[in-house]
Image (cartoon, rainbow, N blue to C red):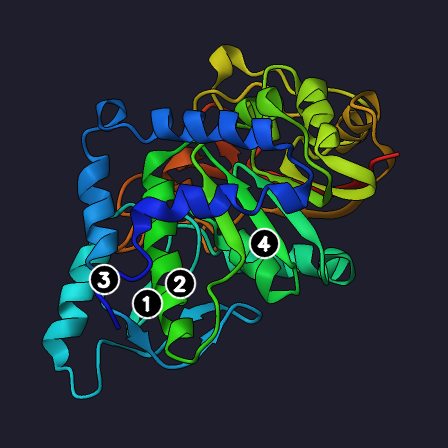
Amino acid sequence: MSALAHDPRGEAARALALLPACGFAPEAVEALRALCAAALAPAQDRRLAGWLDAAAALPAPRGAVEAAGAVRAGEAWGEEGAGAGEGARAEGLLRALCPWRKGPLWLGGTHIDTEWRSDWKWARVRPHVEGALRGARALDVGGGNGYYGWRMWGAGASAVVVVDPGRLPHAQFCAAQRALALALARRGAPPPPVGHLPLTLEALTGAGRGTFDMVFSMGVLYHRRDPAAHVAALRAHGRAGALVVLETLVWAREGDAELPLAGGRYANMGNVWSLPTPARALRWLAEGGLGGGRLVDLTPTTVEEQRRTAWMSSFSLAEALDPADAARTVEGHPAPVRALLLAEVP
């Protein structure tokens, strides 16, 4: 397996190659190509080159690949007979990309125990989307390192485009996608049809419109000052009849209301502007132009689902809760509850 195979620096170009089949005109793709180049320019973050170097240095895993029950690329690193040193080297390269937030991932012989048990969230989402995902073209907005994109592929999606402006999540995607691609190449199979664009939804929408079969926004809405505008942007990328999946923090009480948040802070997070009741979130779906809005799941977030690990060792949910009353955040608000809502593009 060539050490140059599946160079992580080509991931944005591979993601752009998925866009024409998802409804984007050639001029939109070229506009996005320029935006990706600007987002990945060394001056934007001087750590990026080192992160991509680490991703590019990963050896090829060997063993089975799966994304249906977990995200797994092989069981060991390197060629047959490679010693423990190869695994230790690969783990060191992956640790250079810490903190890892979404997962877990099994790459080669390395288990990346991420901050979030994102597989638990996916277990709540999947029963509501797995039929629609088969053969679908999906857009994952704010998808972090691409974990849910690979789970969508594992559930049968034909193409998944992840958009997230974070450069470290992009590098993490590059590393994991390389591992998956090289493990599949050993078996004569193509890489996963999952791409990652280091861009915001607003940048994507400014360049053009997609015709995706499914649009996901999970963990994004409460960071938006204008929630209905966010929903309208999601709607803009779905074909008629497309399923929109919205997962967000909510204020778990009856009625159409919002929880006041002083200074845009909640559970030690900044930039949190909207904590609606489920009824208010459903109203935002309608105001954003979607139909058939419904609440399908409401689950409190626990310190078992979001926690510190060896791969994310800074503050997590336990530090965001009142030490005297775990039912409240350190700011005195109700502890996190997450809602899953579905709607359709008319």
- x 39%, y 37%: residue: 323
Q: Circle 4 is placed at which residue position?
A: 121
Residue 175, relative to residue 42: is it above or below?
Answer: below
**Amino acid under disc 3:** Leu
Residue 215, relative to residue 176: is it above or below?
Answer: above
Residue 194, relative to residue 285: is it above or below?
Answer: below
Residue farthest top in this picture: 263
Where disc 3 sits, the SS reads: loop
Is 244 in front, or is 213?
213
Where disc 4 sits, the SS reads: helix
- Mark 1 → mark 4, Cα distance in angstroms: 19 Å
Is 335 in front, or is 156?
156
Q: Circle 2 is placed at which residue position?
A: 105
Q: Circle 1 is placed at which residue position?
A: 111
- x 47%, y 20%: residue: 271
**Amino acid under disc 4:** Lys
The answer to which of marks 1 and 3 sits earlier in the sequence is 3
**Which of the two discs, 1 and 4, sits closer to the camera?**
1
The answer to which of marks 1 and 2 sits earlier in the sequence is 2
The answer to which of marks 1 and 4 sits earlier in the sequence is 1
Residue farthest front in this picture: 26
The answer to which of marks 4 and 2 sits earlier in the sequence is 2
| Mark 4 nearby-residue class (10 Å; few <14, some 14–19, many ≥20) | some
Q: Circle 3 is placed at which residue position?
A: 58
